[in-house]
Image (cartoon, helix red, strand yellow):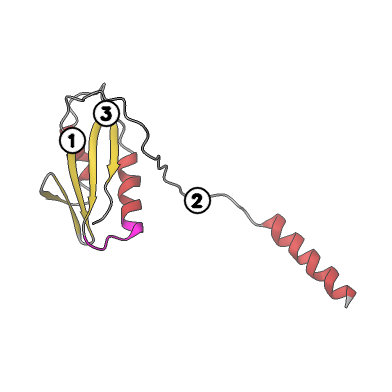
Amino acid sequence: MTSLIDVIFLLLLFFMLSSTFSRFAEVELAAAGAGTGAASNLRPVFLRLAPDGLSLNGTPHEFTALPKALRQHQTDTETDLPVIIALQGEVTAQRLTDLLVAIRALPGLELTVLEAS
């Protein structure tokens, strides 16, 4: 019985040392804080994410064409473009994460995700 316990501890040690505990992908999310009250002169862009598609300001877009469409709305490079993301229907967490990863690659965007109703 004691030799079995020794083998189990050796296997446990081996698997703990040989495995990796790194994260393969992560999306940064920040909680809303207190606002400064400063008004922006940029109109926000409304992005509606549905399980079967997405629309930008009411115009349907493909997922791959979204960065180009967002760059067209971004006229001022000094201030961040506000993007409001609304979830429609039963959007999966994976679909929302894919969208956030694609949008985070674009600089100069201020994202707000609305709660699904």
Residue at 26% in and 63% down: 90
* 91 is within the stretch colored magenta: yes
The percent position of residue 22, horizontal first and vertical second, equals 57, 49
Vertical comparison of 58 with 10: above or below? above
Report the side of 72 relative to 110 (left or right): left
Rendering coords of residue 63 (x, y %): 23, 51
> How far separated are the C-alphas under marks 1 and 3?
10 Å
Pick the residue in front: 60 or 29.
29
Badge 2, how many Cα within 10 Å: few under 14, some, many 20+?
few
Type of residue at label 3? Asp
Name the residue that disc number 2 marks: 24
Q: Residue furthest left?
A: 59
Q: Position of residue 21 (x, y in %)?
A: 60, 52
Span of residues in magenta = 89-95
In the image: residue 14, left or right of residue 32:
right
In the structure shown, which secondary structural element does the residue marked by tag 1 occupy? loop
Q: Which residue is mark 1?
A: 44
Q: Quadrant of residue 38?
A: top left
Which of the numbered marks, if any, corresponds to residue 90? none
Residue 37: horizontal and vertical position, in percent? 27, 25
For residue 106, what is the image quadrant? Answer: top left
| Quarter of the image that includes the N terminus | bottom right
> Between tags 3 and 2, which lies in front?
3
What kind of element bears circle 3? loop
Q: How many marks?
A: 3
